[in-house]
Image: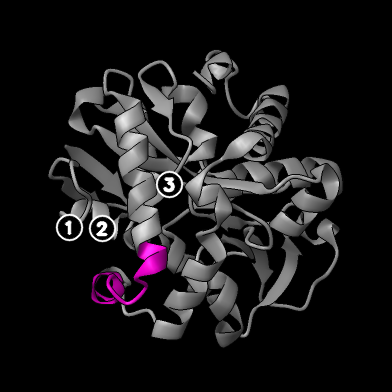
Amino acid sequence: MKIAYSPCPNDTFVFHALTHGLIEGAPSFDVTYADIDVTNHLAIESDPNQHDVMKISFAALPWVLNDYALLSCGGALGRGCGPLVLTADEEHHPAYLRGKRVAVPSERSTAYILFRLWAAQQVEGDIGEIVVMPFHDIMPAVQKGDVDAGLVIHEARFTYQNYGLHKLVDLGDWWEKDTGHAIPLGAIIARRSIEQEALTGWIKQSIDYAWENPQASKDYVREHAQEMDDDVAQSHINLYVNEFTKELGEEGYEAIETFLYRAANDGLVPDTHLHKLRD
C-alpha cells in the first residue's frame, strides 16, 4: 500500500509501527516523505491511484473529497498549536499588515486559510503581496527583511525567538476564542476504493503502539526530523499527537466543518464536495 506523509515528528511517531511491520494483519507500506504543501498538490493534481493514503491539510479537503475519504484517525487537530504570524519588529496591531509583504508556506493550507479568515476580521484594508515559500525559509526571510511578516507552522512555534522575531498573532488562539473549536490542521485521507474500516483499525493500533512504546520510534523520528533538536521534536509530538489523533469524534468533525464552511463562505475554498466530509 502506498502512503505519503511528512517527515515531521508527529507523523513519523504516529505511523512508525504501521510502516515497520509491527501491526498484525496490516499490509506492507511504501512510504513517500513530503511536506504537506507537496502532498496537498499531489492529492489535488495527481492521479488518485498514485497514493492510497495521504496526509494533507484540512484546507485542501474540498478539492479531493470526490476521490478520497477523510479518515477518522491519524490526523492533527488540537488546541494551543496554531500557526503564528511573525514580524522582525515588536508589532502587536493587525493594522501593521496593511500593504505589507507576507510570506506563507502554502495557499492551500490550514495556516493560510486561518490567516485570511483572521485578516478579513481584524485588518482594515488589504494586505499587500502574499509570497509563497518553503516554511523553513520563512523565518530567515523575515529576519533579513525580505518580507515584512511571515506565517509559520510546525516547530517554528518553539524556535522563532532564536531569530529575534516577534509574534504578531497566534492564529490558533484567535480561532479557539472566536469559535470555541480546536484547530483542524492535518487530515488523513484514503482512496474511496480502499476498505476503510480495516485501514482505520491499523492506524489506531499504530497510534496505541506509539503511545505504549514511546522509545521504539525515537531513531525513526530523529532520522527524518531534519536536524531538529530532540527536545523540540518531543515537544512537537506532545503538541500535535492527542486524543483527536486517535479519533476525531463529534467535536473534531464539528471543528472541521466550521473551518471549511467558513472558508467556503469567504470564497477561499469550494463548497462542492463538503457534503462528503463524513462519508
Q: Residue 200 carries which label?
A: none
* Left or right: 56, with 193 as reference point: right
Task: State the SS at label 3.
Answer: loop
Label 3 sits on what residue type? Gly
Residue 239 position, x and y percent, is 56, 66
Mark 1, Cα crowd under 10 Å, few <14 / some 14-19 / many 20+, is few
Magenta residue span: 210-223
Name the residue located 24 percent from the left edge and 42 percent from the top edge. 3
Q: Name the residue under label 2.
A: 17
Instruction: Say whether disc 2 or disc 3 marks the residue closer to the N-terminus.
Output: 2
| Res. 24 visible in picture | yes
Residue shown at the point (63%, 61%) measured from the top left: 81
The disc placed on residue 74 is: 3
Return the mark for residue 20.
1
First-in-chain label (1 vs 3) = 1
Q: In which quarter of the image is residue 165?
A: bottom right
Estimate the spatial distance between the alpha carbons at disc 1 and disc 3, rounded to whole Å.
16 Å
Residue 184 percent across, percent down from the top left: 60, 44
Identify residue type, mark 2.
Answer: Ala
Going 75% across and 63% down the picture, which residue do you hit? 169
x then y, percent, for residue 37: 40, 46
Look at the image and say whether residue 245 sits in the magenta stretch.
no
Front: mark 2 or 3? 2
Q: Which residue is drawn at 22% across and 51% down?
A: 23
Tell me whether the residue at label 1 lies in contact with that at label 2, contact meaning CB atoms closer than 8 angstroms: yes
Dot 2: within a 10 Å radius of its alpha carbon, few (fewer than 14), some, or many (20 or more) residues? many
